Image (tube, rainbow, N blue to C red):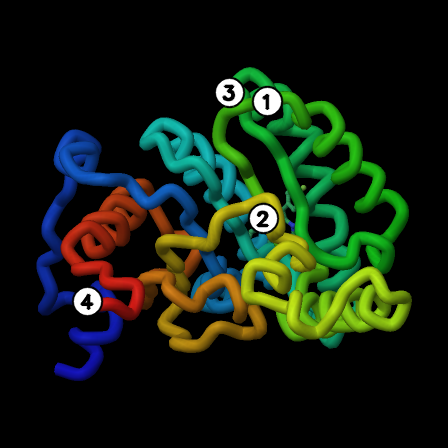
């Protein structure tokens, strides 16, 4: 029963409702959807494949869900692609992961441009390999004037590092007299974060059954609706996105009010 409250649990006993795009478009669509794309290694392990196969399959789902999110009229799609903690993985896996941005963009950037998608990245890109950083910077530049879906990749991103850096910057401004402590408001703090040009996520989706934030957008998720599912990211489909949005639409959102 508890699981039923916290997350969508796809198993033999549950017979999930089928939602259509038309159903979902009857009600307000979340402006900003954030996704922790988990379960790629487990997907591969279940098939006795190398972990890289799960990451590769997961990348195909990124393209599919990006296209569908744009179709639905979602304005911002934030995807947790690589966390500051992921450097602890085996060297070979990190090297493979650091090639995926380039592979994704080489294959899909023309389609993203065609679909008016605006590619953004949050995270410490200075620490990325040169080839990864170059590919990402090229995509950001080539899509900077696009006005459609903002596709925001969190790459070498960690929320605590982001907040700590913001505090350091604010402290320097106070030290040099450009800011006073009284001027530190929630809005000011938000303006020092990497997401300063984005509205906070309205809906957070996390796949693979884990129920935690893993150092993702800790400040920005203060009023976000969470939707957890046991589905592994490589198995995530448009229908799962529709289910998550339907759940979002059913909840009364009060932002702390009554
Ligand atoms: C490190 C990494 C891993 C990665 N995975 C595929 C999706 C599942 C999660 C882990 C593996 N994907 N998928 C797309 C990107 C990407 C990142 C930046 C960018 F500008 C364009 C594409 C990516 N980056």
* Residue 87 visible in image: no
Asked if the residue under mark 2 is in contact with the one under mark 3, i.e. CB atoms within 8 Å, the reply is: no
Residue in view at x 19 percent, y 67 percent: 11
Front position in the image: 225 or 39: 225
Residue under circle 4?
11
Please tell me whether mark 1 or mark 4 is closer to you in this view: 1
Asked if the residue under mark 2 is in contact with the one under mark 4, i.e. CB atoms within 8 Å, the reply is: no
Mark positioned earlier in the residue sequence (3 or 2): 2
Residue under circle 3?
115
Above or below — where is 244 with respect to 111?
A: below
Q: Quadrant of residue 72?
A: top left
Quadrant, the C terminus:
bottom left
Residue under circle 2?
56
| Direction from residue 149 to residue 158 in the image, left or right | right
* Residue 228 visible in image: yes
Asked if the residue under mark 2 is in contact with the one under mark 1, i.e. CB atoms within 8 Å, the reply is: no
Please tell me whether mark 1 or mark 2 is closer to you in this view: 1
Q: Residue furthest top?
A: 114
Dot 2 beta carbon under 8 Å from ligand 1 = yes
Few, some or many residues within 10 Å of mark 3 (<14, 14–19, 20+): some
Please tell me whether mark 4 or mark 3 is closer to you in this view: 3
Provide the secondary structure element on which disc 3 rests: loop
Q: CA distance from mark 3 to mark 2?
A: 22 Å
Provide the secondary structure element on which disc 4 rests: loop
Q: Quadrant of residue 21?
A: top left
Give x and y (percent) for residue 71: 36, 27
Q: CA distance from mark 4 to mark 3?
A: 35 Å
Above or below — where is 19 with respect to 161?
A: above
Front position in the image: 167 or 142: 167
Residue under circle 1?
146
Q: CA distance from mark 3 to mark 1?
A: 9 Å
Front position in the image: 188 or 233: 188
């Amino acid at each position: 029963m508890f699981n039923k409250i916290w997350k969508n649990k796809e198993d033999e006993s549950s017979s999930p409702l089928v939602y259509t795009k038309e159903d979902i478009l009857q009600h307000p669509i979340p402006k900003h959807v954030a996704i922790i794309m988990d379960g790629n290694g487990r997907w591969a392990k279940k098939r006795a494949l190398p972990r890289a196969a799960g990451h590769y399959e997961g990348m195909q789902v990124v393209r599919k869900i990006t296209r569908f999110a744009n179709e639905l009229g979602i304005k911002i799609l934030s995807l947790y692609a690589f966390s500051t903690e992921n450097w602890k993985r085996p060297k070979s896996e990190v090297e493979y992961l650091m090639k995926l941005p380039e592979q994704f963009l080489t294959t899909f950037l023309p389609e993203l441009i065609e679909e008016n998608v605006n590619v953004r990245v949050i995270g410490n890109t200075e620490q990325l390999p040169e080839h990864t950083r170059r590919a990402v910077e090229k995509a950001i530049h080539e899509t900077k004037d696009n006005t459609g879906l903002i596709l925001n990749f969190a790459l070498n991103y960690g929320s605590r590092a982001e907040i700590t850096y913001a505090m350091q910057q604010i402290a320097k401004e106070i030290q040099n007299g450009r800011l006073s402590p009284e001027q530190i408001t929630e809005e000011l703090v938000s303006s020092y974060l990497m997401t300063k040009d984005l509205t906070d996520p309205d809906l957070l989706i996390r796949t693979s059954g884990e129920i935690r934030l893993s150092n993702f957008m800790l400040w920005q998720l203060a009023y976000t609706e969470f939707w957890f599912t046991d589905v592994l990211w490589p198995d995530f489909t448009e229908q799962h996105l529709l289910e998550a949005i339907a759940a979002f639409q059913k909840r009364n959102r009060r932002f702390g009010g009554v």
